[in-house]
Amino acid sequence: MSKILIGSPVRQNKNILKEFLCGLEEADKGTNQISYYFVDDNTDSESTALLEKFANRNNVIIKTGSELYEVQDRYDGHIWQANTLDKIAVYKNTIISFCLENDFDYLFLIDSDIVIDKRALLQLLSDNVDIVSNVFWSQWGDKGPLTAQCFWIPDIYTQFKSFNVPITFQEAHKIRMDTYEQLKTPGLYIVNGLGACTLISKRALEMGVNFTKIPNLQIPGEDRPFCIRAGVLGIDLYMDTHYPAYHIHHERYLSRVDEFKKEGFKFDMCMTVEEPKKMKPFPRIRKFIVRIGNKLVRDFSD
């Protein structure tokens, strides 16, 4: 039996948060001793009320976050403000400190827009590694490809520069897409970067992994300093793809949560299908076409 702390900074839409909390509550935890630590940074009182109701049924610590940042709620890209990321790093480090001070065997850090498969937590524990993320898939933008939350150091936005060989962006893109295809097969894989749904051992925490920004590395995202520290400490990073989680980063994905819980993850669950749009000519072109058409009618009528 292990003593596990499940932690999450929470600033979330109430409908998404409800499914996140249900997923945690319904997860198979075996005989393990489970506690929760939430940093409540909600602006919606109903979201705060959901955390409090969850706390009434479970062993939960809730700390209130300060209002120093705003999260952009348009998901046409994975865009975060710098002070948002700094604050999330502080929150996650606070959770790490609590975990160490109270002698937990594992910390499971999970973002509050993720619903885990009920089998996932025990699967991650069975991997018996120091740091492992449960895979989830996202589509950033309505026409973008599905991507897992693994990435290359130093920077997800310039990954073609980080393969240590002079290759083009197109070649690097193929490497990324091939990696994502590999991750669609259930298994345990070593990756360079991960986050958002991660089981961390007490050993790794005691060695010093944390989310503090590295001052002389200009790298976006609080997960990157965490992963770099792990690499420096000689800790391998793993991605488990047996039971993908469901990433509800927009309310439009809520409609398939029940299906996910009953049948497990399907790749079309996190894809946006757009209706084909009818092309409309510009007004001037339309008037020109109408004028020419009328002239042709007159000419053939004469």
Image (cartoon, rainbow, N blue to C red):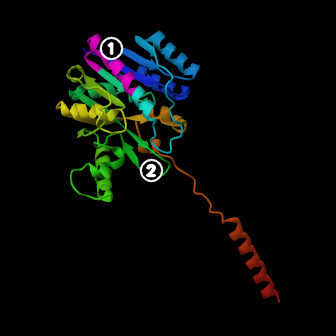
In the rendered image, the residue lying farthest to the front is 216
The residue sitting at the left extreme is 234
Q: Mark 1 points at which residue?
A: 98
Majority SS type along the magenta span: helix
Q: Is residue 249 left or right of residue 170?
A: right
Q: Horizontal and vertical percent for residue 248?
A: 47, 35
State which region is magenta.
88-106
Q: Which of marks 1 and 2 is in front?
A: 1
Instruction: Name the residue rendered at 34%, 44% in the picture.
Output: 156
Query: Circle 2 — which element?
Result: loop
Q: Is 90 part of what is drawn in magenta?
A: yes
Type of amino acid under label 1: Phe
Residue at mark 2: 144
Q: Is residue 147 above or below residue 121?
A: below
Q: Residue at left 41%, top 31%?
A: 85
Disc 2 marks a residue whose amino acid type is Gly
Which image quarter is the C terminus in?
Answer: bottom right
